[in-house]
Amino acid sequence: MPSATLQRSHDTRHLTAAAPGTRPTRRGLLAGGLGTAALLGLSACGTGNSASADGGSGGSAWSFTDDRGHAVRLPRRPKRIAFLTDSVGAALWAAGLHPVAATDSGQGIVPAVKPDWSGVTKIYSADKGVRLEALAQARPDLLIDAVQPDGTLQVASQLPEVAKIAPVVGLSTYHSIEQIVGTADRLTGSLGTTLTDGEAKARYQAASTRLRKAIAANRELRVGFVFGIDKNTLGVMNPKTWAVLKTVSALGMNLVPVPGGSANTYSQAVSWENVPSLPADLLVWAVSDPLPDNPLWKRTPAVRAGQLWKPELASWYAYSWENFTVLLDGLATHVHSARAGIGPHSAS
């Protein structure tokens, strides 16, 4: 890596989409899916999961082992499901699961999967976050929460009263896309719902193959995923934490590394004077808006060469086969056309 001035591991102000002139709140980040991982910069973790459900019509015993390794066992299969965060909810909406209650914190994550809100209680408000009264009135018999990188539940750890309403299953979004969406599919199937994303999964697999081939044909290309922290600092996303980066790394993409240490768990902060020294041939602008107008950004070799891509903001948190097909296809196009060697090389 170039010599970078570490300001702080990351800043949450620009990590999610916000309406013009507004600033995402801590409560909004929790509902949207970044949660305390973005706020505290914790390391990724997770376990496998399994499910079993016997019989139909919700009349037989049901169990599911979630990404905490916690087994939820119920005497009958639950029918009334509530989604407690946008990101986990988006994955389950896309799989075909229809809840009785769900969040939409206004960050564009849920609309990205085109949900059907008929008969669904909206349980998020900008001033209160998850509204316990509305959640309780929806009478759910199972809650789906996001698992933080430290293994805690994103909403239930902040609002312990949630667990008194119904049992909670936790899904982690700190794995590869295949693991995240695959878990959402397994949970949806275990609840007796017919999956609706089979064709989308096939398209995703085709996009994954295209990206793998593009990477193999341009092996020397170095790719950096970056976002704006503040007017003085750029964040370089840690390949070991983000779902998208874990996914493309497994396909062979040569990612700009981030030094170890707790300060860089989520991202490495780079002062603007060091940004032109980032060892990247292709830059992907992520999770913040707008693109910077700093002259040093415009002097960065990849930007100067036009080797820059900025996907839609909601792309980073709407965990569905369909959404990530678009991301992988876009990456394949840019990897195919980019020229390696544009960016500077790290000092050895």
Image: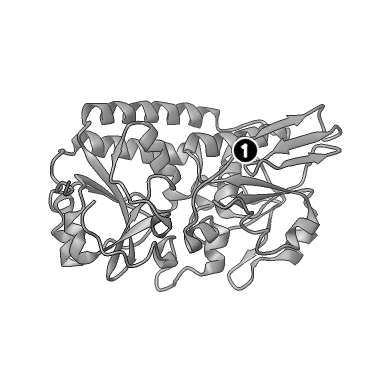
Query: Taking the image as drawn, is residue 293 in sight?
Result: no
Q: Is residue 243 above or below residue 24?
A: above
Crowding around mark 1 (Cα neighbors within 10 Å: few <14, some 14 to 19, many 20+) is some
Residue, disc 1: 96
Q: In the picture provided, is 306 more to the left or to the right than 256?
A: left
Q: In the picture provided, is 123 more to the left or to the right than 57?
A: left
Between residues 18 and 144, which one lies in front from this camera angle? Answer: 144
Instruction: Tell me the kind of residue under disc 1.
Output: Gly
The colour scheme of the drawn protein is one colour
| Quarter of image, res 212 | top left
Q: In the picture provided, is 34 more to the left or to the right than 6?
A: right
Between residues 226 and 336, which one lies in front from this camera angle? Answer: 226
Query: Taking the image as drawn, is residue 41 in sight?
Result: yes
What residue sits 20% from the left and 34% below the top?
220
Residue 6, given in percent of the width and then of the height, sits at 31, 64
Label 1: which secondary element: loop
| Quarter of image, res 239 | top left
Residue 259, given in percent of the width and then of the height, sits at 33, 51
